[in-house]
Image: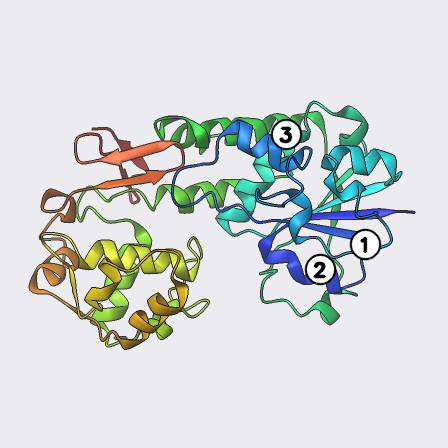
Amino acid sequence: MKRMILTSSSGVGLAHAGRADMVVPFIYRFVSGPLPSAAHLDRYLGWRESKFYDEVHWSNFVRRSPFVSDEDRARPLLQVIEIYGVDLVELWFDPEPNSQLQLSWLLDSLRSEPSITENLRLRRVDFDLREADPSELRHRDVPQVDIAESDLEIASMVWEAYRAPTPELCAGLLGRQFGKLCFLKPAMEDLLAELPSPVTGLGATEMRLLERIAGGHDRTDALFRPGALGIRVFDPWELGALLERLAFGPAPAIAGLDGKLATLDPDNARSRNAAFRRSRLSLTEFGEAVLAGREDFCRHNPIKRWWGGTLLTNERLWRWDRESRLLIGP
């Protein structure tokens, strides 16, 4: 029996676990920045259009294997599954929000292919795949469930809602049952919590950063360490962007972040990492007031950032009240 595993970037270790003939990790980050266009995502799963590998493709992060020839790796993923007679396609996506968004996108993309969906099985991964040891994954018992049409419908609704130009559809989904896709609802709750608070103007991770800095954690390596914040929505480089937003506005909430970060090329990872390591962070007086709920960060600083398909600006600012689970419009 030929097996293929589809997973998020958190599951790259599965390639060393020996549980499938091929492991395909998806690398897109949907929790920060503008979402890739539908056409771009279609090309990602489709034919590799350039022999020079200048556009990301599903096969870029797949280990070379006799299971699929180098020539066929340029084909659409669904075509490879059919040509090579894959009997079972397992979905390994852990509970963290970006992985769950990838799962909803993938199921939405596969929904129109009944020949593939019949062979889909969802592994209920209730642990952190990124931190799992491949040798332990080899034998770990992970429950497996079939995928029904109703599950595909739920995934499509979630993906459509997240891509919408406002968060209203996502907030409305919290009242629904998600069935076998049981990690989608808590993931959506975590994502909504990243919208600005009606009191502080900051999302959950931004507030957690202020709390940790106020508690004496003034080094970025401690803040960026996996699990340090107790919230797993953003990757370390995305946390860096949050710190810059908190530190470099007209009314900064954070002091001590190396000023060179404001001018360094975003792709200059080496220099940026060095600048983060040089930083010694503290809260400004304004930051202390925001943390205490006495000031609203958004009223003193320009806002322009993406939340799914929603562009948040000062004039078009959607907020989320976590206590009342209420979406507040502009």
Q: Which residue is mark 1?
A: 20
Q: Earlier along the polypeptide chain: callout 1 or callout 2?
A: 2
Residue flagged by tag 1: what amino acid is it? Answer: Ala
Q: Quick check: 208 above or below 192?
A: below
Residue flagged by tag 3: what amino acid is it? Answer: Ser
Give SS at disc 2: helix
Q: Which residue is mark 3?
A: 109
Q: Quick check: 281 above or below 251?
A: below
Cα distance between the residues tagged 1 and 2: 8 Å
Q: Is residue 226 visible from the viewing direction of this image?
A: yes
| Crowd tier of the residue under label 3, counting other residues whose Cα lies within 10 Å: few below 14, some 14–19, many 20 or above | some
Quarter in which the C terminus is drawn: top left
Cα distance between the residues tagged 3 and 1: 22 Å
Q: Which mark is residue 14?
A: 2
Q: Earlier along the polypeptide chain: callout 3 or callout 1?
A: 1
Give SS at disc 3: helix
Answer with left or right where residue 118 lies relative to residue 177: right
Give SS at disc 1: loop
Cα distance between the residues tagged 3 and 2: 23 Å
